[in-house]
Image: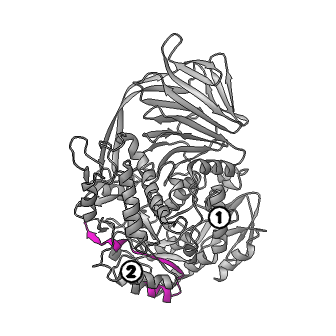
Amino acid sequence: MALDALDTGFALRLGRQVILTHSEDAPCFFVGRGVPHVHSKLGHFDVSQEVIERIALGHVEVAGDVVRFAEAAGSPWLLEATVSGDDSDAAIALTALDPALNRLWLRVPADAGEHVWGGGEQFSYFDLRGRHFPLWSSEPGVGRDPSSELFRQVEAHRKGGGGSYAHTNYPQPTYVSSRRYALHVDSFAYAAFDFRNADYHEVEVWEIPAKIELWARPHFTELVSALSARFGRQPPLPEWLLKGAVIGLKDGDNSFARLKAYEDAGVAVSGLWCEDWVGLRITSFGNRLFWDWQWNAERYPELPARIAELKERGIRFLGYVNPYLAVDGPLYAEAAAQGFMVMRPDKDEPYVIDFGEFDCGHVDFTNPAAAAWFADTIIGEKMIDFGLSGWMADFGEYLPVDVRLANGESGMTAHNRWPALWGEVNARGIAGRGQTGEMMIFMRSGAAGVQRHCPMLWAGDQSVDFSRHDGIGTVICAALSAGMLGNAHHHSDCGGYTSLFDTARDAELAMRWAEMSAFTSMIRTHEGNRPRQNVQYDDDPGLLAHFAKMTRIYAHLAPYLRRLSKEASETGLPVQRPLFLHFDDDPATYAIQTSYLLGPDLLVAPVIAAGKSEWTAYLPAGAEWVHVWSGQTYAGGGDATVAAPFGQPPVFYRAGSADAGLFEGIAVV
């Protein structure tokens, strides 16, 4: 790292390139003041601001590693930056010299043809260049394409529910550039990345952040490893998970009989996931759960004995939890009596909000006693001690901004931090029982630092269709973007989740989704929000046989996944990887978001459109590729079109791979 003073500014060099430049005519920092306006309903947020002032900091003074900024020569100093680092890493610590300042804008030089990835978990666009991304944790919305009929239907039914391409459960103010550097804003305040200008990227933060962090490396794999070291790494996958699929059923005690039918059909099973272990609540949206996190004996009689029987057969039982408590459940009363709830700003009572025809309160994770109670009493006692081997750790995005928290933090910064706090509570509960690496929890919400607490992401509530911005293809984009920031393990609801209006899962979608899920860290089914209106994998013998084959392929790949999982815990490299992670000299791979590498040697290009019997995939230059099903070899550096009947998803392995024998075996599983 070098900070070079120039006649009217400076240049910050990292590695062998200039990352940041400043001159009087082209300042890199702007500061100002603004007033936020936030309206929320059911996890959807309308966020805007009134900008009172925005000041270009044109005048600088460089003294060693400290830079002071002012609007012009002779005007008051407004911002101080202290630069530290080495040849490959740098940090810019920021101090506002005027306490009234609460906005910062940073412009980073951009190159023609540059690509940018990251931003947390993005569902519509992997390459962020050319677009604007607000970074605020929320429901992603349903019908995220404003031109779609589904968007119009959702907006008419519930204004604001349609979302947009940038809405995400997991925002993170971190990006990776094809110039081989990464940038992170050390803040949980509302932020935005604007990649629309040809000459610069603009980062906006609704506070003066503690620091801006930078990394430069010659290879993308090294950048991902550096980021994962910064944010945390996941333990290896539990050995039991690699035996097969986690079957998601919410059918009460009948779930066990249905699971036996899956086994009898040859499905490789690792777990039974019954999110309704806590009981059901029926709403207009569909079958919801009773949000009080303990066994509902009426819906699942003799569940402890059932769990023990499953474990004897090598099958684990998984459940569901989220950070909220229903006001009509006993745990809410217990938590409220101890002062463990997020409070209203104007009254001495818990902040209760409508979650869709039922009211809940938030447990206040900024209160150490409340976090410890949730970790030990709910996660430890009522879940792990009860016999659960994992769970969906749902939600985390709903915290309002007008709250009173135990630590005095503003809701405007606590909101984006909440998913990381939620992940930490789960991790503490697991560690307290000595079960780290043995429990399989999966989360949809996230924030910087969730990586060290959450062993598995799940892509949230995709629509049960092939649509561009809501359906099956968004899962690949989500896995790749999150993986660039140190989230090694990712999966989705096999078959999708959200069924609204005339959107319903059919057998074709169910099969194509299973084909994709077989080549991820975890294969897990979900009946969806309206189980009886959607095709289920055990509805038809042919569909079940197809699913069984995909689960056996997943189990067949266990030796490979086991090694990738160990590698992830040591290096942070994700299991699902963008093509350029191993082919960084092939720019044609930089914007591809419809296929991925499973580890370094297996290329997966799932069929993500309806009515297809063949599929075309780009094969990276620098290797030859063998089609798993035909054995035909293709040269890299171009497209390959292959037959793609049901049961034969487009998969290729790198010729000469040490795992060629394992990959050849996929075709005969």
In the rendered image, the vertical position of residue 342 relative to residue 66, given as above or below: below
Q: Is residue 174 highlighted in magenta?
A: no
Q: Quadrant of the N terminus?
A: top right
Tag 2, which secondary structure? Answer: helix
- Neighbourhood count class around disc 1 (C-alpha, 10 Å): few under 14, some 14–19, many 20 upward: some
What's the amino acid at mark 2?
A: Pro
Tag 1, which secondary structure? Answer: helix
What stretch of residues is rendered in magenta?
Answer: 259-283
In the rendered image, the vertical position of residue 227 relative to residue 154, given as above or below: above
* First-in-chain label (2 vs 1): 2
In the image, 47 versus 367, the foreground residue is 367
Q: Is residue 265 highlighted in magenta?
A: yes
Does any portion of residue 305 appear in the rendered image? yes
Q: Would you identify the image quadrant in which residue 637 lies?
A: bottom right
- Neighbourhood count class around disc 2 (C-alpha, 10 Å): few under 14, some 14–19, many 20 upward: some
Q: Residue at x 45, y 87 (%)?
A: 260
What's the amino acid at mark 1?
A: Lys
Q: Is residue 106 left or right of residue 114?
A: left
Residue at the limit of the structure toward the right, as seen here: 656
Position in image of residue 616 (x %, y %): 62, 65
Q: Residue at x 55, y 75 (%)?
A: 240
Mark 2 sits on what residue?
304
* Label annotation for residue 566: 1
In the image, 29 versus 294, the foreground residue is 294
